[in-house]
Amino acid sequence: MAQAAASTCEICIGGPGEHYCQQCNQLFCGSCKLSHLRANICKNHTFLSGPKKEDTLLCAEHEERCLSYCHDCDTPVCIVCSVEKHSRHLMKGLAETTLKFKSELFENIESKAGTTNFNLGKIEKDTKVYREKVKAVIKTITEEGKYWKQLIDKKVEALIKLVQDKEQKETQNMTAYSEVYKGVAENCQTWQNNIKKMETTADIILLNKLKQLKTDVDKFVLKQIPDAPSVSYKSKTPAGTEIDNLFGEIQFPIGKAVLKQTDNKQSAKY
């Protein structure tokens, strides 16, 4: 088990280890840092200020710096442990392993970010297309409804006109019969009045006048009036399926989730 090292300069072992060299994996005090950077081989090294205690690990058993990483055991090890306990294991430098792990993790995150951005764009585009389709479907249904409504209105107008035309014809016919019988009624009234006026006439003369009147009465033949006109309407209650057959069919295809796949490499443990 590795433990945190004390924050002291590892060069002079006296000053505070306030600067951590990322290339050498060592703590430096301010003075040793300046000397370190003056050397040509180290002039491009980079430092971190105030390293955390856990940034520098020592082997708990040997108090040696952990400079290697055992892949089989998935743990940092010092040089002594690498020989005594991990000699047959897959070993690599701790800095190299960390850098590779960081690179692969970044690549994995970048891949997921790319997939996410692609899917967000696709969702936005698909949503826009879907809404346009919804508008088109609603427009088609509305136009189809108007079409059938116009046909129904025309049919209603035609049925009403048929009834009204028939009414006019039958009414005219009944009026004609009524006028005929009104004339007959007037004649009957006249005949009745004439008979009353003949009450004082002598019988022989009265008989002749009555015979003449009978001749006039017999000339009028009463026609049988036609049956009273009638009209009715038998309503139909269409089934729901009949109404459905007037319209098209709305279809909602079952969508499939489609994600843009990118190379998501599984980060190996080091």
Image: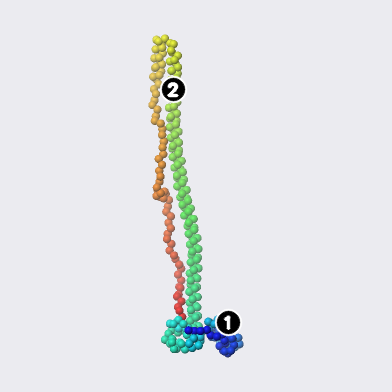
Q: Are marks 1 and 2 in contact (CB under 8 Å)?
A: no
Q: Secondary structure at mark 2?
A: helix
User: In the rendering, at what x and y percent does residue 5 appear?
Assistant: 53, 85
- What residue is shown at x 41% (from left), y 18% (from top)? 216
**Residue visible at 42% across and 60% down in the picture:** 254
Judged from the image, the secondary structure of the residue bearing numbered disc 1 is loop
Residue 28 visible to the viewer: no
What's the residue at 41%, 34% (across, down)? 230
The quadrant holding residue 163 is top left
Hey, what amino acid is under mark 1?
A: Gly
Q: Is residue 207 visible?
A: yes
The residue where tag 2 is placed is: 185
Residue under pointer 1: 50
Measured from the top left, where is residue 109 in percent x and y? 49, 73
Q: CA distance from mark 1 to mark 2?
A: 133 Å
Using the image as rendered, state which of residue 226 and residue 165 is in the foreground: 226
**Circle 2: residue type:** Ala
- Circle 1 residues within 10 Å: few <14, some 14–19, many ≥20: few
Residue 88, percent from left and from top = 42, 86
Nearer the camera: disc 1 or disc 2: 1
Q: Which mark is residue 246?
A: none
Splitting the image into 4 quarters, where does residue 155 fall? top left
State the colouring used for the structure image.
rainbow
Q: Height in image: 81 above or below 172?
A: below
Q: Is residue 197 above or below residue 106?
A: above
Please tell me how crowded label 2 is: few (under 14), some (14-19), or many (20+) other residues with Cα within 10 Å: few
**74 above or below 235?**
below
Nearer the N terminus, badge 1 or badge 2? 1
Q: Position of residue 87 (x, y in %)?
A: 43, 87
